[in-house]
Amino acid sequence: MFELLSTNGKSRRGRLTLPHGIVETPCFMPIATKGAVKTLSSEDVEALGASIVLSNTYHLLLRPGLEGIEKLGGLHHLMGWKKPILTDSGGYQVFSLSKMNKTTEDGVTFQSHIDGKRIHLTPELSMQMQKAIGSDIVMQFDDVAAGDSTRERYEQAMELSLRWARRCKEEFSKTPRLNHSTTQSLFAIVQGGTHEDLRQKSVEGLVEIGFDGYAIGGLSVGEKREDAYRVAEFICDRMPADKPRYFMGGGMPEEIVHYVSLGVDMFDCVIPTRNARHGTLFTWAQDPSTIDFSKRPTDFYKKLNVTGEASTFDESPVDAWCDCSTCKTVSRAYLRHLFSVGEMLAMRLATIHNLRFYLRLMEELRKKKDA
RNA sequence: GUGCCUAUAGCACAGUGGUUAGUGCACCGGGUUGUGGUCCCGGCUACGAGAGUUCAAUUCUCUCUAGGCACC
């Protein structure tokens, strides 16, 4: 299911063949937490050039629920999205959303942020839910420690994630495939904070169990960027070369460039979509096809706060180098006006642009490897 | 014309005879890393004018000006 097409130093050019289609890597996965990339239709997302999206087990478990999603025929059918879907397991949401949760060996009990109902999420339930969703790529249920945790906490989270990984694999292997696909993949998640020895133990333990792909979890959660770079390289150097590598949750454009140079194949991040909704847009500092990414540049883009005063009478497009529909049809002045009066269209136009920026970045990064 | 009420930031309002006059919205700037669509952190801008009482007035008194209400 994963072909390594070429390498250049540590960086890789690959191809994932999944039940719902082919994903060229390195790739970026737009986030459709509750079954939609906010403000966009599935058709929009496809037109932007996305080949896979990320959705979320935790949110879909709350609504429409396990039985609900089965009755609805799985998430692909519900969304009208024909390409691959990866689902996060819900582990991160326990860390990031709910302050009122309790982690035990069995799983996590927390209160729904919607109606306060108590939910007990276990590795087994997460697997069942992701199967019901019909994800092309299922993520293991994991325990994420905050970026400023003690070594003890990192170690505990890593060990627990390792034990949960085993349970996920068992459940994943035995439960009848509820949906359309017979070839869902299961990815494991490496934990261990910024400690190399813990990360090493995590990778080795997971590889021994055996998964279809491996993710780097627990970074971009408050630690220093240089620590994240160091740990990511350490992990990549110990991951199996013939399996896809997924950096979870990151990051800024220059971080993605850096991680690609270390050999990461897959990314997801809320930055392009969330920043778009708050008026922060990414723009190219030069023609993207002329950027030499092998030098790990950090200055190849600029952030534009389009709600700022400077855009008030600016008739120019958001980005002259961009080929998205927003840049081809509207001015900065119009976008600023739409934000200023609170029109929903502002968020949509900005989301289209920022996602296109990220997807274009990946296209350019792949081109360099193709050449 | 007469009486009463009001006058504090761009707007709506708090408040005080004594160091640096608050809040919300608006505006300006920054943030956002396995989603917060409404979030977070900063910043700017004010006691209508004049006189009096007082050690000290945005605060109390008077006059003026402007606005509101009522009555002719």
Image (cartoon, coloured by chain):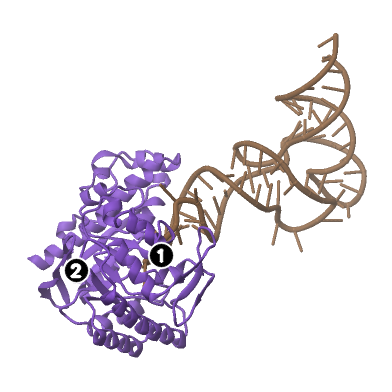
**A68 displayed left or right of A211:** right
Query: Nearest the camera: A272 or A145?
Result: A145
Chain ID, brown in image = B
Q: Which residue is located at x 20 percent, y 75 percent? A: A263
Chain A rendering hue: purple
Q: Quadrant of residue B47?
A: top right
Question: Where A157 sits versus A111, above or below?
Answer: below
Q: Residue A145: horizontal and vertical position, in percent?
A: 43, 78
Task: Using the rendered view, name the quadrant where residue A160 is placed.
Answer: bottom left
How far, Cα to Cα, is label 2 from label 1? 22 Å
Q: Earlier in the sequence, mark 2 or mark 1?
A: 1
Horizontal side, residue B18 vs residue A262: left or right: right
Q: Tell me the residue that label 1 is attached to.
A: A58
Classify the position of the N terminus of chain A by image quarter.
bottom left
Residue type, mark 1 in image: Tyr
Res A183 label: 2
- Which corner quadrant holds the C terminus of chain A? bottom left
Left or right of B20 on screen, residue A178: left
Above or below — where is A139 with respect to A299?
below
Q: Is residue A117 left or right of residue B31?
A: right
